[in-house]
Each structure stands twice: as structure tokens, then as C-alpha cells.
Amino acid sequence: MDEKIATLKKWVDESDNIVFFGGAGVSTESGIPDFRSVDGLYNQKYDYPPETILSHTFFMRKTSEFYKFYKDKLLLEGAKPNKAHLKLAELEKAGKLKAVITQNIDGLHQDAGSKEVMELHGSVQRNYCMKCHAFYDFAAIKEKVNEAEDMVPKCDKCGGIIKPDVVLYEEGLDGLTMQKSVQYIQNADVLIIGGTSLAVYPAAGLIDYYRGNKLVLINLQPTPRDKYANLCIAGKIGEVFSQI
């Protein structure tokens, strides 16, 4: 076993207060594209840049164009939890992992069985009418987008536009979710960060709240925070987790 992975396994075995903070790289192994890799959404060509499309202003002004992109790139069916999701759920069930903090919006952590999941950027699994706040799940929103001539899903009750419960650019993160995430990180013995470039703020700033000496960074590419880590492992999160 690789020396670094052996160290990670030792820390995990000895701790009952682990927190995991993950990004898009956790879900790419389940076939969900990320935003910033070579093949990610930011390197594909549309009428508008993805960062513009995924903004609050664009959603309000060009809702049909937003949902055209949203349907193609974010309403993805068939994705299954991978080894990373499953291992995290296993660690939580064993009483070792206290929480998963994720930047992802796919709901795969819950599908794997994780209970305490802090979704910093919301979830495609939840959708709400902007007028009457009626709830629509993933299947309902996908059906409505497919059926609508302009791809804009409308509420059955009041006819209002339905908006995904995801945090768009220009929107703030949920205060309670951030507060709980900070508390988990502050109290953690081991903080494992995986599959994220640590480039998106304010989420990436959560690492600053960690007070321990077992900060683990697992990522394919170097991050701006590697020099602060106690352990850096270059690799896919699922492959690493399958060895601990």
C-alpha cells in the first residue's frame, strides 16, 4: 500500500470525528461532468458562457435559454453513487464520519446512504415554484422541461415559473448550511478534502476554519492550498477511498 494512503487509513481508523468536504471531482467518477476540467462545462461552447447561463440575472431574463442548458447538462439521469460516495456513507454509519459538506448538486451522497449532508450549492432534486413555493422533485421537473414548448417548467397550482433549488451565480449561500458546515469543520479531528480545486469562494474558504493537524487533500491536480495540507494525495477520490 502506498505510504500516503497508509497514513490516511491510519488516521481514519483512529478517528471518530472525520469531516469530508468535496467538489465536482467526487461525482465525475459517476459520469457527471465538472465545470473546470479539460472536458468540463467551462470548456464547451454555447451561445453564452456557462458562468453567464448559471447566473441569477440570466435565469430571470432568459429563462428558456437557461433551461435549455440546464436540461442538457444538469438534469442527468442514471448516475449512480461511486466508491467515494459509498465509502463516506459507510464511515458515517460506523460512527466515524460526522458530516459530508459538498459543492455538488446531484444528490448522490444521499443516494449512497449519507444522512448528514451539507449541500452548499443546493440540489437538482428540489425545485420550487417562485410564486406559491410548491415543491417539485427531479422527475417532475424533468417531465415539465421536456413537455414545455419553451422548456420553462410551470407550476400546476398557480402557473408560476419553477426554479431549481440550486445556488446560481450572484446568489448567496444558505446561511444555516454555512454555519453548520463551519461548526463541523472547526470541531473535526480529521478533515478530508477531495475532488475540488478549492477555487470557488466562499465555499473554498471553509478550509480556514479547520483547527486540527490532519488536513488531507485528495485531488487529481494541485490546489492553491496544497502547501497547508498535512497530507496530499494525487489521484481520483474513489480509487483512493477504495484502499482505506
Image (spheres, rainbow, N blue to C red):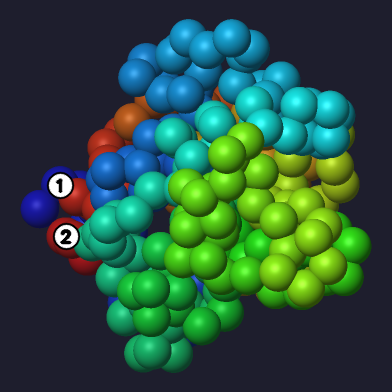
Residue 216: % across, % down? 46, 50
- Check disc 2 and report the residue beneath it: 243
Q: What is the secondary structure assignment of the residue under circle 1?
A: loop
Q: Residue at x 82, y 57 (%)?
A: 160
Task: Note whether 45 is above or below 217 in the view shown.
Answer: above
Would residue 222 appear left or right of 235 to someone viewing this image?
Answer: right
Determine contact: label 2, label 1, CB under 8 Å: yes
Q: Quadrant of the C terminus?
A: bottom left
Q: Residue at x 47, y 24 (%)?
A: 41
Would residue 181 appear left or right of 5 to someone viewing this image?
Answer: right
- Check disc 1 and report the residue beneath it: 2
Task: Note whether 48 is above or below 119 in the view shown.
Answer: above
Task: Note whether 226 is above or below 96 in the view shown.
Answer: above
Which-is-in-front pick, marks 2 and 1? 2
* Amino acid on which disc 1 is placed: Asp
Residue 188: % across, % down? 62, 70
Residue 96: % across, % down? 43, 83
Q: Mark 2 packing: few (<14 Cα in 10 Å), some, or many (20+)? A: few
* Amino acid on which disc 2 is placed: Gln
Q: Residue at x 33, y 31 (%)?
A: 220
Q: Nearer the viewer, residue 127 or 7?
A: 127
